[in-house]
Amino acid sequence: MDPERKKKLQKSFGILGESDAISEIIEVIAQVAPTDISVLICGESGTGKELIANALHRMSLRKHKPLVKVNCGAIPAGIIESELFGHVKGSFTGAIEDRKGYFETANGGTIFLDEIGEMPIETQVKLLRVLELGEFNPVGGSNSVRVDVRVIAATNKELTSEIEKERFRKDLYYRLKTITIVAPRLRDHPGDIAELVRHFGVEFANRNNITFKGFSPNAMKELMDYSWPGNIRELKNFVESMIVLQKGELINSKMVRSRLYAGQQARVSTNLPMKVSKSVDQAERELILQQILMMRREFREIRDLLAEKGSRIDLENIPSFDISKTLPTYAREPKEFEEGRETNYDEEEIINPHKLGKISLEEVERDLIEKTLDKFNYKKRQTANSLQISERTLYRKIKEYGLQ
């Protein structure tokens, strides 16, 4: 397909991306849309299956006729036949007049059956008849109604598995899958995330009259590294929430991480194993100790790097501080803590009690909290996230140490 035509179609459909998977979908839509053949769209929730259905209809010869969308999973099993095929007066309690169903409403156009894997098996029999003969009987009616409707179906289920469990008819499956389009998961084409983010951001900002300065390169890398279980829908909602929360600011990686992993359990490094039978306060103090150990490890790496470069800086004489009397016996490298047994440690593997000065745990904790607050300009949420403690605990510590 001509690149210019492809871009024009993508802009028109709202199906963005330069990956091979997206390009293939655009090609298939262009080839299949002008026909009346049934199409089955497969893919996880949030991958844009409805956008593909819209594109198929808008490029078809039926584009001036109705496109009727039906979410099969949202209609109770007891009334789905009436909703799809209509009913006659008196066919059941409450049927006070004849009523057209979705198929009759879509006559001459297209019907999009979303989440078709949720359709009751009894209703599937009538759907198969519509596909093969173009006719059906309304609920309670004896006269057939003929319709000319193109069927596009979508599912996030593995229909072959549903067939094995006898929850989906094999003959209907083969009738629908004449043409199958697979909407790719977002994590399978992360190269398209940047374009999607820009599109969602600009569109939302313009619609709500909000300044949008974009995402920094590191923030964009965070987005591309994330798995996005909710796919494009989740990405769109995330971008919109970030624009609202960080109104007028360039969105950086720290902002992204604090929101992206909000509500998830704090990920504690295995470099500092902790016993679980401890109070919340003890556990949080040990998280601070973890940060100290990580800082010491980074210091050693810098010292070694400078030594390799022939630096004349005397790093060996830089004083350290000691927390030996408050450091838990299990606050060691993982390989040296086995079943609670004590061993001898080399100074490069754990803080050496003999080389360190004397300072209490409270002083270490106060100093670390004060420096972190200063680093983040006293923004409590960012400080708490950096220290891996709750905001409530941070406020308590600020009050306790007089850091107002």
Image: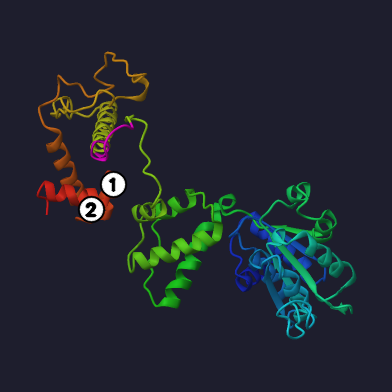
User: Which image quadrant: the C terminus?
Assistant: bottom left
Find numbered disc 1 in the image and state the secondary structure of the residue it sits on: helix
Q: Compared to 82, does 289 lie above or below?
A: above
Which label sits on residue 376? 2
Residue 9 coordinates in the image, percent (x, y): 66, 71
Q: Is residue 200 magenta?
A: no
Query: Which quadrant of the structure image shows residue 233?
Result: bottom right
Tell which residue pokes out farthest to the top in this image.
Answer: 344
- What's the mark number on residue 321? none
Residue 106 at x, y percent in the picture: 76, 79
- Write down the quadrant of residue 337 in the picture: top left
Per the rendered image, the range of residues in magenta is 276-284
Q: Which mark is residue 386?
A: 1
Whether residue 108 sits left or right of residue 205 in the image: it is: right
Residue drawn 28% across and 27% down?
A: 331
Q: Position of residue 262 (x, y in %)?
A: 38, 53
